[in-house]
Image (cartoon, grey):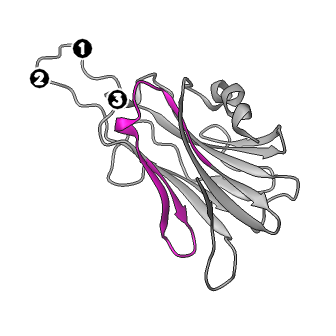
């Protein structure tokens, strides 16, 4: 599915964000060992055609050109709403970057069907409209998800929803699985 992203006032998309949220693991009364924390991670992989040129995630919070920023790492899912956000300023994107993939991975190894109230979404940063949303709790027995990508098409940026489950606990694990989706 391809959607042209537009800001009616300016004729093209300028800002987009990826938001990720989930509930912390709950300790059950009958469980003696306690619940293992759940650490989901939002990441953005920046490509120049088929070559990865930058990554933004919990260990590298800003892209080299400053156009992509991870606003902070949640290691437990505590709190309401969005636990991690990646903000993308497409007006500052390096000219060689042709596509940005948005990923979710589970650093602690739980599959999405083991995590309560997990979601990720893409939001237009100007209108605050939700462009895409995934309920990760229904994403099955995967530890990663390729949410979608924004890509250059002429002078405009477009969004393509992907929604592909992968096996990845860290963005580095995801790269070989993402490169097949670049074209």
Above or below, 16 against 169 in this view is below
Residue 79: x and y in percent read: 33, 49
* The residue positioned farthest toward the bottom in the image shown: 9
Residue at the spot 52% in from the left edge and 75% down from the top edge: 127
Give the foreground label among 2 and 3: 3
Q: In the picture, residue 9 is in which quadrant?
A: bottom right
At a point 81% along the width and 69% down the height, the residue shown is: 155
Examine the structure image and report whether residue 17 is included in the region drawn in magenta.
no
Neighbours of disc 1 within 10 Å: few (<14), some (14-19), many (20+): few
Quarter of the image where one finds residue 158: bottom right
Toward the viewer: 28 or 7?
7
Q: Which mark, by number, is residue 33?
A: 1
What is the spatial separation of the Cα atoms under label 1 and label 3, in whole angstroms?
21 Å
- Are dots 2 and 1 in contact, CB under 8 Å? no
First reached walking from the N terminus: tag 1 or tag 3: 1
Q: Secondary structure at mark 1?
A: loop
The residue drawn where x is 58% and y is 53% is 1
The Cα–Cα distance between marks 2 and 1, rounded to whole angstroms, is 10 Å
Residue reaching furthest to the left = 29
Q: Residues within 10 Å of mark 2 (few under 14, many from 20)?
A: few
As helix, strand or loop, the secondary structure at mark 3 comes to helix
How far apart marks 2 and 3 lie (CA) works out to 21 Å
In the displayed structure image, the side of residue 84 where residue 151 appears, left or right: right
Residue under label 2: 29
Residue 64 numbered mark, or none: none
Which residue is label 3 attached to?
113
Disc nearer the start of the sequence (2/3): 2
Residue 143: % across, % down: 48, 27
Residue 64, image x, y percentages:
80, 50
Q: Nearer the viewer, mark 1 or mark 3?
A: 3
The local crowd at label 3, few if under 14, some if 14 to 19, many if 20 or more residues have their Cα within 10 Å, is some
The magenta segment is 120-148
């Amino acid at each position: 599915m391809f959607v042209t992203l537009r800001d009616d006032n300016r004729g093209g998309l300028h800002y987009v964000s990826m938001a990720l949220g989930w509930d912390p693991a709950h300790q059950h009364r009958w469980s003696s060992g306690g619940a293992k924390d759940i650490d989901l991670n939002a990441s953005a992989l920046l490509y120049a055609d088929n070559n990865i040129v930058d990554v933004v995630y919990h260990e590298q919070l800003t892209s080299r050109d400053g156009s992509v920023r991870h606003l902070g790492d949640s290691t437990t899912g505590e709190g309401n709403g969005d636990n991690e956000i990646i903000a993308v300023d497409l007006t500052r994107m390096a000219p060689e970057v042709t596509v940005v993939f948005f990923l979710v991975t589970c650093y602690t190894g739980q599959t999405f069907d083991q995590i309560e109230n997990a979601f990720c979404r893409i939001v237009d940063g100007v209108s605050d409209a939700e462009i895409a949303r995934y309920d990760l709790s229904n994403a099955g027995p995967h530890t990663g998800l390729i949410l979608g990508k924004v890509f250059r098409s002429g002078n405009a940026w477009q969004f393509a929803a992907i929604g592909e489950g992968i096996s990845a606990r860290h963005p580095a694990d995801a790269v070989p699985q993402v490169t097949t989706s670049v074209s």
